[in-house]
Every structure is written in structure tokens, then in C-alpha cells.
Amino acid sequence: MRKTLKAFSENLDSIPPADGKRSEPCVLLTRYRSVRRFSERLCKPLVNEDYVIQSMPEASPTKWHLAHTTWFFETFFLPAVDKCYRLFNPSYKYLFNSYYNAVGRQYPRPQRGLLARPTVAEIWNYRERIDECVAGILDSDPSLSSEAAQILDLGLNHEQQHQELMLTDLKHLYSCNPLRPAYDTCRFSGPTHSCALRFDHYPGGVHWIGHDGSSFSFDNETPRHRVFCEAFQIGSRPVTNQEYLEFIEDEGYQRPELWLSAGWESVQTKGWVAPLYWEKQDGKWMMMSLAGPREVRPDEPVCHISYFEADAYARWADARLPTEWEWEVAAQDAAEEGSFVEDGYYHPLPLRSGQNQGLAQMLGDVWEWTQSAYTAYPGFRPVAGALGEYNGKFMCNQMVLRGGSCATPRSHIRTTYRNFFPPETRWQFSGIRLAGDAA
């Protein structure tokens, strides 16, 4: 199993080992506590009622996220280091298993909001008990195997994914409440920089894409391989609310010639007339944010856009979406300058002064849809066992997004990261970067 896990991680994300080889348990413990405490920090604004409601089948209650991320360590890490480990509560194996068929049955995803018990207090106790077990091992075992260290690091990156989902799921939950409650008094950005959209050109040629194995990556980012790109151009920044408003005002949602067939069906059956969380009040476009409702700001990147909407907008703008390999080639020289969850804005920011050089906001602010279907890289092999179900089995009917968002932890994102969602998905912080062919 050690060889198959190598595809997930060669070293530890963001904390290099002192000897250049393998991190010691004390370094792992520091990172473990940091990630787990950040989940607790995200829960500070919540009251008990916020933890338990499921607003749609695709979302999960915060209580379930807290339990599931703990279940991951209990299911995969603790038995790897303690063959005599006994489950905290055997029923949790069923209740908080997400989709690992090799582990056993799963409680139905659309019904997670029905789990009034175990209580929120019991889930916090569960987290505390598992944290004690993990900390005890990391504090006392100087010979932690590479296999166990890699499982632990995978679990931490898995929890960071759920930290983002906690925020996006809470935002959808609050948007369903007519009181429009706020998650927190989020920060707002300072002075912004008005910058016309520009297209940067890249010549055709052979490029390497995919992760090189020098730090943590998920298996779907590997193996590193060569691709040939025809000459292309890519937008210098994401599409803004103002630019998307022009699409709306030009009857973009009423023109079937702009839409893919499945996208037009979604527009008709779901009544889309604007991005998710937008609504018109007294002649003004308002939007729901994690700070509550507010007026749409023209200079912010448009977000909560489906792939179908991104594709239709690109066609309207006489452009297209980038392929994921075009995006990665262009992003290799981009600065890490966007907004991430640690910044506390919880919303994509307008372009700020000094961000107009090169490609702006490639990382952070909004996930950017690509025109690429989520499929395996050449030579891809999922890892053996239950952990092989993490990514590979979802390589069907999904589209790739790149770059991270304002709800993504900064240490979690990289230019090779492949996110994926069905094309109708809108509740993530997803936006648009245009591309086109170039001579």
C-alpha cells in the first residue's frame, strides 16, 4: 500500500521537513492541530440550529462535515498505526461515510439533515476524542511510517476541502431563510483598480502539465505529462459583475442560440435569469453574501455561475472558456495574489491596485470553469483500496475548475489542482475567465 499511496503525497504540504526527507511527528502534529483548529474557527459564528439543517441534497449540514472529516482520520489513519484500535462509536461508520463503498454502506446523502442525533455536542466530543488519539500517536511515536504520514496528510487536505464546503453550504442555507441572516460581519475590500480586460497570448507548443511529486497532490493531478497546445490567448482577469450584467441586459438568458442544449434546458426548467443569489429589488440587483444581502458591486468577479452560464457568456462575448491545460500553462507564471479564506472576506474581491501586471487573480477569489471534461490523465491509476475511491470514480459527467476561491485555504491550492463539479452546479464560488484562439 505504501507504493500506491505515493501518488497522493511525496512530502508534506507547506511545511518542509528539516532534513529534506520526511517530516517528524512533531511537525505533523503542528499541522494537524492547525487544520483542525481552523475548522473550529469557521464554526465560531454559528448557533446550534445552524449546524443541523440541510438546504439541498448537494449540500451537507455543518455537523455532518465536522463528523465526516473526523471519521476520515478514525477510519484510515488510526487503524494504520494501531492495529488494536476500537471505533469510538460503531454506528458512525455508517452515518458519516460519504461514498467509500469499500468501507461499507453509507447513510443517504439527501437525508443528512434528518440526523438530529447524534447531537452537536456529541460530535464535538467525537472530534475531541479522535484528536486526542491522533495527538497521542504523533507526540509519542518517533517511527511513524511513510504510509501513515501520507494518510494523515491526505486527511488534512480532505478537511481543507470540507472547510470550503462548510462555507458554501452555509451560504446556501442562509439564502433559503427569508430573514437573510449573516454568517459573520465579513471584511470588505479597500481601494480597487479599474482595469480593462486584456488578452495575453501564448505560442503553440509542447508543455508539461500535472504535479511533479515535489509536494502534496491528489492522485488526479498525476502523472505529469506532456500536452500540445495550439497558440491561444487568455483573459488577464476574471469576468466582472458589470460585464456579466451586460450579458443579462442583452437578453443572454432568453437567447437559445447562446446555450448548450442541456444548459438551455436548465435555464427553462430552473428559471435562471441571473447568477445564483442575485435578485432585483426596486430596480437594483442585490445579492446574498455571507455577510447578508447587499447590492451587486460592478467591479467584483462574477461568481456562483454554472458551467452552462460560463459557456453561454463566453459565446456571447465572442470568446470561449480555456481548456484546463491552457489554464495551467498560463498559470505557471501567475502570482499568488487572490483572496483566500484566511483573509476573512468570504467573497471574491475586485482587482486591487498593483494587480494589473500579468495575469491577475489566477489563484483565489473564484474557481474558474474550463471547457475540459473531468477525465483521467494518461497513465493515471487510482490508489489501491478504499482511498482509490477519493477521485477516480467521479471521472464522468463533470467539468474541471481551476484556481481556488475566496473560501479555499491558501495552503491548499496550487496551479495543478483539479476541482470538478457537474455543469449545472452554482453554489460554489465559481466564475469565468475567457480564452480564445490565437494565430
Image (tube, grey):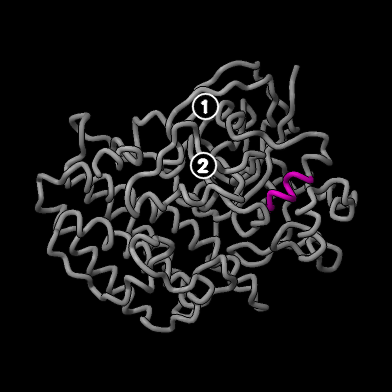
Instruction: State yes or no: residue 179 in magenta.
Output: no
* Quadrant showing the C terminus: top right
Judged from this view, the residue extending furthest toward the bottom is 116
Which sits earlier in the primary sequence, circle 1 or circle 2?
Answer: 1
Residue 96: which quarter of the image? bottom left
Q: Residue at 52% across / 26% down in the picture?
A: 332
Q: Residue at 44% across / 58% down in the picture?
A: 162
Label 2 residue SS: loop
Say which residue label 2 marks.
418
- Horizontally, residue 126 falls left or right of residue 108, namely left
Label 1 residue SS: loop
Q: Residue at 82% across / 38% down in the picture?
A: 317
Tally the marks.
2
Q: Which residues are magenta?
A: 305-312
> Height in image: 250 above or below 117?
above
Say which residue label 1 marks.
332
- Horizontally, residue 290 falls left or right of residue 114, namely right
* Quadrant showing the N terminus: top left
Instruction: State yes or no: residue 308 in magenta.
Output: yes
Residue 146: which quarter of the image? top left
> Looking at numbered disc 2 in the image, what kind of residue is underneath it?
Arg
What x and y, as percent, mark residue 355? 61, 33
